[in-house]
Image (tube, rainbow, N blue to C red):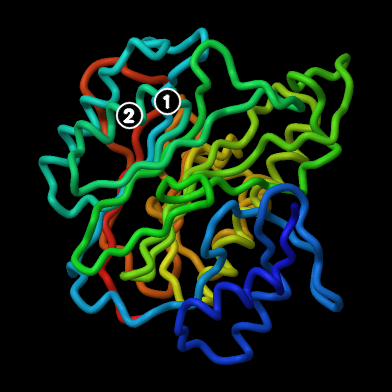
Amino acid sequence: MSVSALTHRKRTAARKPYVAGAAVLAALLASTACGAGSADTPKGAAAPVAEASTGEAVAMAGQGAQRMPSRVAALTWNICGIASACPNRGEGQTEQIEEIAEIVKADSGYAVVLLQETCAVHSKLLKKKLGKNWVVRHRDGLMMGTKDRTFPCEAGVAVAMKKLPGSTFVKGPDGRLGWDVTFTRTRGLEHVDGKADRPRTQYTTQGAACLQDKGNNILACSSHFVPGSVKNATKIQNLSLGDLRQTTVDWQKGGYRTIVGGDFNIDVKAKNLPVVGLKRMSGMYRGNFEADSDNNGATHGKRKIDYIFFSDRGWKLRGGGVRKTSGKLSDHRMLTAAVAVRPL
């Protein structure tokens, strides 16, 4: 049964003492909806753009984040888990996870890891390798326009967050930490398997895996937009980007620092930046800054299609860029960044 944003907010507010003002609450009610299936829209509110399966929705910021480290690092990487071109294809190939674990262990500042094309086994191994001080959320990938999981290993996305001093992670209705966000704007555009000669459906497969650290007012999400080869790719990418941006806006208004990113498949080349690419991505630069802020890091061949966006609120860029990995582990390069923690 769907739950309206207004009803859900009342339930949440009844349980938790939040400190944000009425104006912020009203803005959140107008722009955020949660629950399984389509959400009802409160009278006078804007139509919901994303469904968040979470017990907290866009919770107002608490009193935490008083003991956070002064520096936080993050990385995103499409590990190339299933595509036929992947150098280490399939759930049995775990060298990518070993690589991530080594990088994170070498720098204690790492607190967020965003992965794409991950199979469930990759996410489980990531949790094992990172250890008890980390939380990992995996979202299965679905075949375009269907409810079927991707073959051969349910490749999806994953987000991992380190337990910082004062961390309190929120569970979703499935009893696991974190939740899956579904981008609703793509509904009605997806063809089965993404092929023009297959039927168009009302299923929406695009979304993100998110974790919420309520104690430190941090939200982190990992996403993977459709490739350019599928039917309606540009529209679906743009609408997915709009939904992800709205997610960041809602949480930032609620007093949260946000870290979102992944493989957007939106081409912003390392050199001679195309106007069309910059125009499509421009919305994400309002209220956020990018890990590789000079846009010089090609992450897939000569293309710039992988991103990490930090909210202007609560963070300040210290440096970021493309990082080389050992051997040929993926067709994507890893993108990393470090930020200084600022008061909210």
Q: Is residue 59 above or below residue 188?
A: below
Q: Which amino acid, by three-letter code, is at mark 2?
A: Lys
Q: What element carries label 2?
A: helix
Q: In this view, does 281 lie above or below 56?
A: above
Using the image, tell me which numbered label, if any, was put on residue 71. Answer: none
- The residues bearing labels 1 and 2 have C-alpha atoms spaced at a distance of 6 Å
Number of on-image labels: 2
Residue at (52, 76) in percent of width and height:
254
Mark 1 vs 2: CB contact within 8 A: yes
Residue at (31, 64) in percent of width and height:
168
Give the class, few, some or many, for how many residues have Cα within 10 Å of label 2's Cα (few <14, many ≥20): some
Residue 96, horizontal then vertical, whole percent: 29, 23
Give the class, few, some or many, for how many residues have Cα within 10 Å of label 1's Cα (few <14, many ≥20): many
Q: Which amino acid, by three-letter code, is at mark 1?
A: Ala
Q: In the image, is 276 to the left or to the right of 261? A: right
Residue at (38, 41) in percent of width and height:
76
Mark 2 sits on what residue? 124
Q: Which of 199 and 320 is in front in this view?
A: 199
Residue 188 in view: yes
Mark 1 sits on what residue? 120
